[in-house]
Image (cartoon, rainbow, N blue to C red):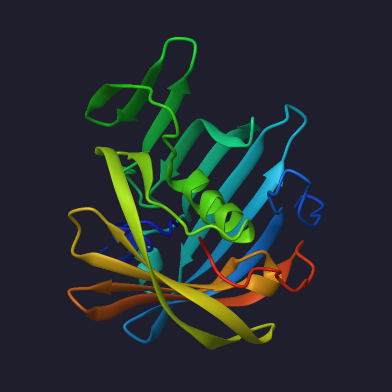
Amino acid sequence: MSLCHTLLPAALLLSLTLPLRAAEPAGIAEYQAEYEVRYKGRRVADAVFSVTSNADSEFIFRSSTRARGLLRLASPNPATDESRFRLENERLQPVGFHFVDGSRKGEDNFAIAFDRAAGEIRVTRESGVQSLTLENDLLDRGTLQVAIMRDLAACKMPGPYRYVDDDGIAMSQYNRLDDLTAETGIGMLATVRFSQQREGSSRNTVLWLAPDFAFLPVRIEQFRNGELQTAFMLESLAGIERKASTCSGFR
């Protein structure tokens, strides 16, 4: 699952156990968060987001969304996003991204390789390979989620971010909304809210982020043409300890 333009993969609608620890000095929180997923008010899936690190000094963002009920017939396997990245000179550097759509045929699966030696990005889909020029500060769908949390923890406004997806390079913009309290599986939490919009998309995502938990998204709402379609609601969290944020605003 992504917080970007495809929160619940189309295959689900049609058709994250490593030890965890709190935020590192690098400013990247390692965690595992579980969500219930509702589509037009009906629970249709369960999702898990996680960030972990490995022995190669890489971080891994992973989201996994598993359909429930009859939707399992079309998508018997979890739909997953997995992003490997490094933090170098305080900049997120994607290494590779892989999406699996969860369907039987996997026709929407794709992978992205960031080849810094060659200055190239390769997007591999069923239809073939697309080559793009590697530019500074380009993200993928996974590192985009990490960038939002890091920027907010540094009292910065999120975005705009440019990222690589299966259809090329996209941009997401952010607008501040009113702060509200969210009911979650770990209690009532104060949140800051932002509207996220992919350039040229009819979809709009509202992010409810908890300052006391490293700005983890505790509720994610996806709208299409003004109508609420999909909502992710936090059920449980491991790896991030509660700590009051020192941000009084975002610059």
User: Is residue 126 placed above or below 184 in the rendered structure?
Assistant: above
Q: Quadrant of the N terminus?
A: bottom left
The quarter of the displayed image where residue 196 is located: bottom left
Total residue callouts: 0
**Which residue: 70% across, 46% down?**
52
Q: Is residue 107 visible?
A: no
Q: Pick the residue in front: 109 or 249.
A: 249
Left or right: 195, with 116 as reference point: left
The quarter of the displayed image where residue 249 is located: bottom right
User: Is residue 78 placed above or below 136 in the rendered structure?
Assistant: below
**Which residue: 52% across, 55% down?**
148
Give coordinates of residue 175: x percent, y percent: 36, 67
User: Is residue 186 placed above or below 34 in the rendered structure?
Assistant: below
**Which residue: 70% across, 54% down?**
29
Left or right: 230, with 86 as reference point: left
Give coordinates of residue 141: x percent, y percent: 43, 46
Q: Is residue 7 visible?
A: yes
Give coordinates of residue 146: x percent, y percent: 56, 51
The quarter of the displayed image where residue 20 is located: bottom right
Farthest residue, direction top: 118
